[in-house]
Amino acid sequence: MKTEYRPYRARSTVNKLKHVDDWLWVSYTLNPYRGCAHLCVYCDARANQYGLSATFEQVVYCKENAVDALERQLPRLKRSIVSTGGVCDAYQPIEAERRITRRILETLARHRFPVEVLTKSDLVLRDLDVLQEINGVAWAGVLFTITTFDPVVAGRFEPYAPSPERRLTALE
């Protein structure tokens, strides 16, 4: 499958939750991209409840102005955990080129906001320096989705995501 990437100007980047999330303990969510190239068959973001298009994995919109929007929003927010990657993977393949997630993390570090990264990608290791900086002034956590250790099964359920082996290696 070929994924098309398009620039997108977001009005805002941070979504404030009505209540702290019971499962992940976050107050805010932030998705640097709209859409995801991993094409995971179990992806709940592709469900109708999020109002996303049927082309969720075919066209990924890159929030090119995410940092500017974030800079406008952060002064109005109470310092609490920001979760990236709930409706998309913040470290999907295009992130290697666009670096939107990295710039977001740098901004959160400057503002001393704690962060939680949900991902299936070992590309998160590229930003370990920024995550360590955040962890030094607030808190930073990385959560990897690993559905199976069998690469054949993983290839069926997550055809374009990094292998479970790469994720496990990144955890080390």
Image (cartoon, helix red, strand yellow):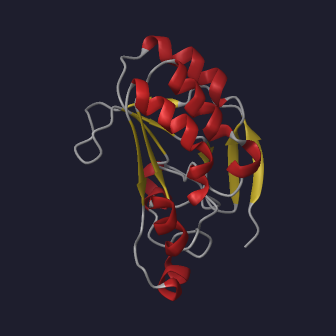
How many marks the image carries: the answer is 0
In the rendered image, which quarter contains the C terminus?
Answer: bottom left
Q: Is residue 125 left or right of residue 134?
A: right
**Residue at the image position 55 percent from the left and 43 percent from the top:** 128
When asked about the image quadrant of residue 15, the answer is top left
**Residue at the image position 68 percent from the left and 58 percent from the top:** 93
Point out residue 144 in the picture as x, y percentages from the top left corner: 43, 59
Residue farthest to the top, as pictured = 75
In the rendered image, which quarter contains the N terminus?
Answer: bottom right
Q: Is residue 29 visible?
A: yes
Q: Is residue 43 above or below residue 49?
A: below
Q: Is residue 43 left or right of residue 27?
A: right
When asked about the image quadrant of residue 130, the answer is top right
Residue farthest to the left, as pictured = 22
Point out residue 64 in the picture as x, y percentages from the top left corner: 72, 34
* 2, 94: nearer the viewer: 94
Q: Is residue 108 left or right of residue 3?
A: left
**Residue at the image position 69 percent from the left and 62 percent from the top:** 58
* 55, 132: nearer the viewer: 132
Q: Is residue 91 visible?
A: no
**Residue at the image position 76 percent from the left and 52 percent from the top:** 5
Point out residue 117 in the picture as x, y percentages from the top left corner: 46, 45
Residue farthest to the bottom, as pictured = 152
Point out residue 159 in the picture as x, y percentages from the top left corner: 59, 76
Q: Is residue 31 above or below residue 105?
A: below
When asked about the image quadrant of residue 101, the answer is top right
